[in-house]
Image (cartoon, coloured by chain):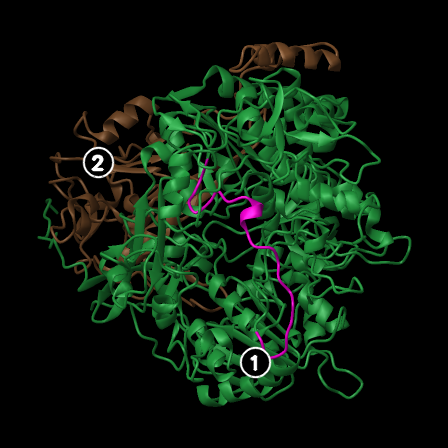
């Protein structure tokens, strides 16, 4: 079994804003594109033009319907990828040391040359965030675009994960949670960023910002004065109009 | 094992080269960086410098690599060898293909140009394709706007000189309340997502009004699950409340709208209901400074909203009085509309009050001076920070035009159009209907048409009717059935051509329009019409030419296929002459260029039209010596001159003293300059011209400089539409051009010069108790407006389209997961899988559109999930309504614009035993390309 580093210098990860995610899957496909072409084996697709196509994705968006006891039902879009846990069970379960957590930044990676494709890590992950590539028979997972975020061949502004760069709604944020002044730490503090399934004890680094409360427009009683009629009779409207107009430029 | 970690290369080479072009995975036209490795496309990301997407990119855009690799790409020109619809083709050369097309088309051009119907679907080159059609001389040309969103476009143009999407956008930086009406995950895809992200980050509020709470509506802070087709009623109820409460921007209404213009009130006058004009034909207002009549645009004039005026014995009342009278009527009270709209009266009040509060208590002021067209200087820009966006959801109903007008009326009465925090036009808009061409339809054999096909009618005189009152166009656009059909009516072409009504045609020429499948109402009937034969055994529509890049369902129904390229293999221009990509703060245009060369015997469709145009001797495509004018589309883009100094691209034109923005002669290096500058050109709107564009002289002057128009043309918003009134007046018996009797009442009822609401037309002929449930479709965000639903990555995300059923109907039918239902309309039945969705209007079902595929198409296997369980709602929708009492069947379209009324569909639902596959299902068509195979393990850079 594989050991986790006792601590990491940085805790790089994502803040995903569930209030803003419109469920467009831009992050899913951008991730697929970058990671097919870059780190490790390509993300393969089986039966791509056949009955039931299926392929390897490092990031998927799930949609859940929420039906509160009172009020209207709502839909929540929930993007999910590896959360780069501090106590990553997928690492400790790995029999070969292929799964590891980087000491510099806390990114959890799979060293594909050491991966025997046993799949134990995927079983150990409570989030279902790892996928076995059916062609290459190695375990694939979010790399936090480790080959982008330090990449000197990219302009500095682009040294973020592909999913963050592409997100049209700006619902994904990348940064260092070890730094309390970082964008992700501030967002998490301000918006009540949450751990996914904290009871699993994995201490996920990624955080989710909960949807703001929906359908909470002020009560009509509070708003009512804004609709106070200017007149009780339809004809009274014209009287109001003439009075209102007299205060305008050119008014007599 | 103790912690060890390998050494990684953290700075791998990303690509050999980045080629910047424009996406075409949908109609949004974002800038993309195409990363090339070893001459192949390796990765696609958004272009950060691009005005549309500013670096972001949606799922479709990133999946473009699977489009340029798609096995469904056509490989060569094809000639049909089996019966139509079989899909049996043989590959032929371009020379042979051109020869066939020429043999069919040349006699038509010379003798009867109208016998060619040329309709383009998801065309982004309409200023080019329409020029070709004009050159041919046929009046029968349009793109797909008639079955998409013409109500939105026309409603906006006729009311305020532009609508949403390509015309205008919310002021994302300043708006405090954003209300989204009826938008599926559609038009202006990335900018809307970016805008929503922006306002949410600022803590501004977003409200969704939509029967379905998915996508954008899922993140809306508040949701109104309205009953389909009643948006206009809800909007007018809000207008009613705002009038009643005096929450109106009277200053704005007086100065910048025709609320202050004067209406002839004499029922006996031939000018009844028209505006009082001066000798120059300009509307008159009463100047508050003098109490006397003055021209609307007179220097220093302060128009009066309330003064009446007696001229030649006839009383004239201001439009504003008429509005007050109409909208204060209790028929629009929340209590009166609650049941119909499915929105409680208290909730309507809540929404109206929030609009009132935000517009007037939270108004914003920018310290920016500006001067209006009356020469009046304003020391600040006052904004009503309520913004709206809307598209097909309110548009695709038979009351959609007036609903769009109602929405614009709401925007205008609170003063939130072209003011900070409201809605902002995108150059070259705003542009009122009077600044657009009128439709042209005069046919002269062997000669070009007398002008552009599509335009904005101003009254009955502009209709496309012959001396006997018959339709001149095959789609019957611009007739009394739908006088303002500004985008044509593509959905009626095949049906009318098949019926020989108004006449028979010889050749149907289509581009990128899947009419034999998801782009037609009545799909089954359309397939039959396309294959129907006459008593001699000849096809009723004798010749069909089709151009597509992919093996779509429509391919099998054509006789001749001109294979198009993918979007990464071609030249294009996203031109100010047709559907530009501008933003509120900038004018912009863009190009596509071949970032890879095609590896097949295919040609960009527009280049093929350059060749074909020259072979046919069409004037715009032939030099005086008879030789071919444009070698290909790139040559056209560079060298075509539309009017002096104006060509397809506005950037880097050749001026007298070097390169010029906007105006100038052709520049041979123009395309390369675009490529060198990221594939687009952009010029910013001056700060003092940023708002009040229709009225702001700084904007007007800049627009002339930029070539949008040739002289300043300020205007005021037309809350009261004279073109509509002119049609109505004719229906009341005034004038020589009269509607046929059976349409007289419809014209009177629907062409009200003030925005109104009426029930969807189908409700008058269909049985409400038999078909009580509304049925809608929308495209998923990852496929909106995409020509690539067979895309290997995207079909893994959206490969299924169950019918989503609300709780009430779900429980009433005792549905359980995995169940199927028969869904019936007055027109037909389908049998489809169902799924439960609670966040849905309780009388509405819906599904994802265009997921269902026909077996044999798109290089998918015959057992693909899209063919087995996928389905189209199209089978339930007819292009004609059921017969009225008099036996006549009317077009299932908006009676004003002809917009296809897709969303008027009503159905009933019954649980049935699960069939083996969705019904109807069709036998496989033969594919002209090999089926796709797998697995895919592409890594270009290995």
Judging from the image, mark 1 belongs to the subunit labelled: B
* Chain rendered brown: A
Judging from the image, mark 2 belongs to the subunit labelled: A
* Chain rendered green: B
Q: Nearer the viewer, residue B383 or B700?
A: B700
Direction from residue A53 to residue B181 in the image, left or right: right
Q: How many numbered dots are placed on residues in this image?
A: 2
Residue B414 visible in the snapshot: no
In percent of width and height, residue B712 lies at 44, 42
Judging by the rendered image, the residue that carries numbered circle 1 is B926
Q: In this rendering, is residue B635 above or below B712?
A: below
Direction from residue B621 to residue A83 in the image, left or right: left
Q: Magenta stretch: dominant SS?
A: loop
Q: Are marks 2 and 1 in contact (CB under 8 Å)?
A: no
Quadrant of res B646: bottom left
Residue at 37% over, 58% down = B23
Tag 2 secondary structure: strand
Q: Residues within 10 Å of mark 1 (few under 14, many from 20)?
A: some
B438 falls in the magenta region? yes
Q: In this rendering, is residue B208 above or below B507?
A: above
Tell me, for residue A175, which label it has, or none.
2
Mark 2 and mark 1: span between their CA atoms? 53 Å
B535 falls in the magenta region? no
Quadrant of res B470: bottom right
Q: Residues within 10 Å of mark 2 (few under 14, many from 20)?
A: some
Please state the extent of the stretch shown in magenta in the rendering.
B424-447
């Amino acid at each position: 079994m594989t050991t986790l580093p006792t601590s990491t210098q940085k805790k790089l990860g994502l803040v995903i804003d569930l209030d803003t995610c419109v469920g467009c899957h831009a992050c899913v496909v951008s991730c697929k594109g970058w990671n097919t072409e870059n780190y490790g084996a390509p993300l393969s697709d089986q039966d791509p033009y056949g009955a039931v196509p299926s392929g390897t994705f490092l990031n998927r968006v799930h949609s859940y319907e929420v039906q509160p006891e009172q009020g209207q039902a709502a839909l929540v879009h929930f993007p999910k990828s590896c959360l780069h846990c501090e106590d990553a069970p997928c690492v400790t379960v790995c029999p070969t040391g292929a799964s590891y957590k980087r000491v510099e930044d806390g990114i959890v990676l799979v060293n594909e040359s050491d991966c025997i494709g046993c799949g134990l890590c995927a079983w150990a992950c409570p989030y279902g965030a790892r996928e076995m590539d059916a062609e290459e028979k190695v375990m694939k997972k979010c790399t936090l675009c480790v080959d982008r975020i330090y990449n000197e061949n990219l302009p500095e502004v682009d040294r973020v994960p592909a999913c963050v760069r592409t997100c049209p709604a700006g619902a994904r944020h990348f940064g260092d949670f070890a730094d309390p002044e970082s964008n992700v730490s501030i967002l998490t503090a301000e918006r009540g960023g949450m751990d996914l399934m904290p009871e699993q004890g994995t201490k996920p680094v990624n955080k989710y910002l909960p949807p703001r409360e929906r359908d909470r427009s002020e009560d009509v009683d509070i708003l009512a004065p804004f609709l106070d009629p200017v007149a009780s009779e339809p004809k009274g409207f014209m009287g109001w109009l003439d009075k209102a107009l007299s205060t305008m430029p050119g008014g007599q | 094992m103790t912690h060890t970690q390998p050494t990684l290369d953290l700075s791998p080479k990303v690509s050999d080269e980045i080629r910047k072009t424009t996406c075409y995975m949908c109609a949004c036209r974002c800038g993309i960086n195409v990363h090339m490795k070893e001459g192949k496309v390796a990765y696609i990301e958004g272009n950060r410098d691009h005005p549309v997407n500013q670096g972001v990119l949606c799922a479709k855009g990133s999946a473009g690599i699977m489009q340029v690799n798609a096995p469904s790409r056509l490989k060569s020109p094809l000639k049909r060898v089996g019966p139509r619809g079989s899909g049996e083709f043989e590959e032929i050369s371009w020379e042979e293909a051109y020869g066939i097309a020429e043999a069919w088309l040349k006699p038509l051009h010379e003798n009867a140009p109208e016998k060619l119907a040329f309709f383009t679907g998801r065309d982004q080159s309409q200023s080019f394709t329409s020029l070709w059609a004009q050159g041919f001389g046929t009046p029968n040309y349009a793109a797909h706007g008639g079955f998409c969103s013409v109500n939105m476009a026309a409603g906006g143009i006729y009311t305020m000189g532009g609508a949403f999407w390509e015309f205008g956008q919310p002021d994302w930086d300043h708006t405090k309340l954003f209300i989204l009406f009826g938008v599926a995950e559609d038009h202006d895809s990335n900018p809307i997502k970016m805008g929503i992200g922006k306002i949410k980050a600022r803590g501004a509020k977003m409200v969704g009004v939509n029967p379905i709470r998915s996508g954008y509506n899922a993140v809306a802070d508040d949701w109104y699950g309205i009953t389909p087709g009643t948006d206009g009623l809800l909007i007018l109820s809000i207008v009613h409340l705002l009038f009643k409460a005096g929450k109106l921007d009277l200053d704005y209404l007086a100065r910048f709208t025709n609320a202050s213009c004067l209406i002839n009130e004499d029922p006996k006058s031939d000018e009844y209901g028209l505006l009082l004009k001066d000798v120059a034909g300009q509307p008159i207002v009463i100047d508050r400074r003098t109490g006397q009549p003055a021209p609307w645009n007179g220097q220093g004039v302060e128009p009066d909203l309330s003064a009446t005026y007696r001229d030649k014995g006839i009383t004239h009342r201001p439009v504003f009085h008429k509005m007050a009278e109409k909208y204060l009527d209790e028929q629009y009270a929340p209590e009166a509309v609650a049941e119909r709209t499915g929105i409680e009266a208290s909730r309507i009040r809540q929404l109206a009050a929030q609009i009132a509060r935000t517009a007037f208590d939270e108004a914003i002021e920018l310290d920016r001076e500006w001067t209006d067209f009356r020469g009046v200087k304003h020391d600040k820009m006052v904004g009503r920070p309520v913004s709206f966006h809307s598209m097909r959801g309110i548009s695709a109903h038979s009351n959609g035009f007036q609903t769009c007008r109602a929405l614009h009326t709401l925007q205008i009465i609170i003063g939130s159009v072209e003011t900070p925090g409201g809605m902002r036009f995108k150059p070259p808009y705003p542009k009122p209907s009077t600044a657009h061409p009128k439709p042209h339809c005069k046919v002269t054999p062997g000669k070009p048409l007398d002008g552009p096909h599509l335009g904005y009618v101003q009254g009955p005189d502009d209709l496309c009717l012959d001396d006997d009152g018959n339709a001149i166009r095959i789609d019957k656009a611009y007739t009394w059935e739908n006088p303002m059909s500004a985008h044509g009516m593509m959905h009626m072409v095949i049906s009318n051509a098949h019926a020989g009504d108004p006449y028979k045609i010889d050749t149907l020429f289509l581009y990128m329009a899947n009419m034999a499948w998801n782009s037609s109402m009545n799909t089954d009937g359309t397939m039959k019409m396309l294959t129907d034969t006459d008593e001699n055994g000849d096809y009723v529509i004798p010749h069909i030419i089709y151009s597509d890049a992919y093996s779509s369902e429509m391919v099998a129904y054509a006789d001749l296929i001109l294979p198009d390229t993918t979007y990464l293999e071609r030249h294009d221009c996203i031109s100010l002459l047709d559907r530009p990509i501008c933003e509120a703060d900038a004018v912009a245009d863009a190009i596509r260029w071949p970032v890879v060369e095609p590896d097949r015997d295919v040609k960009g469709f527009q280049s093929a039209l350059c060749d074909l145009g020259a072979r046919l001797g069409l004037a715009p495509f032939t030099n005086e010596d008879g030789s071919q004018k444009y070698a290909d589309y790139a040559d056209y883009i560079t060298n075509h001159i539309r009017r002096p100094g104006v060509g397809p691209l506005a950037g880097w034109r050749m001026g007298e003293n070097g390169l010029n923005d906007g105006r100038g002669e052709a520049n041979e290096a123009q395309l390369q300059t675009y490529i060198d500058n990221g594939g687009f050109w952009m010029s910013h709107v001056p700060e003092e011209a940023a708002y009040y564009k229709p009225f702001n002289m700084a904007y007007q002057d800049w627009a002339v400089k930029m070539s949008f128009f040739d002289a300043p043309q300020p205007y005021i918003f037309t809350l009261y539409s004279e073109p509509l009134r002119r049609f109505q007046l004719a229906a009341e018996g005034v004038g020589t051009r009269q509607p046929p009797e059976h349409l007289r009442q419809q014209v009177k009822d629907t062409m009200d010069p003030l925005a109104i609401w009426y029930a969807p037309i189908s409700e008058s002929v269909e049985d409400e108790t038999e078909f009580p449930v509304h049925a809608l479709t929308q495209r998923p965000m990852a496929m909106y407006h995409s020509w690539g639903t067979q895309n290997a990555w995207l079909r893994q995300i959206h490969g299924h389209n169950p019918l989503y059923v609300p709780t009430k109907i779900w429980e009433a039918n005792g549905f359980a997961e995995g169940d199927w239902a028969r869904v019936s309309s007055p027109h037909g039945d389908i049998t489809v899988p169902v799924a439960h969705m609670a966040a849905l209007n309780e009388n509405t079902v819906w599904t994802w559109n265009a997921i269902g595929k026909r077996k044999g198409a798109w290089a998918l296997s015959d057992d693909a999930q899209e063919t087995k369980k996928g389905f189209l709602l199209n089978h339930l929708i007819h292009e004609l309504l059921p017969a009225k009492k008099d036996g006549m069947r009317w077009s299932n379209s908006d009676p004003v614009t002809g917009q296809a009324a897709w969303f008027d569909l009503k159905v009933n639902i019954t649980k049935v035993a699960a069939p083996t596959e969705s019904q109807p299902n069709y036998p496989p068509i033969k594919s002209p390309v090999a089926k796709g195979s797998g697995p895919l393990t592409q890594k270009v850079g290995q």
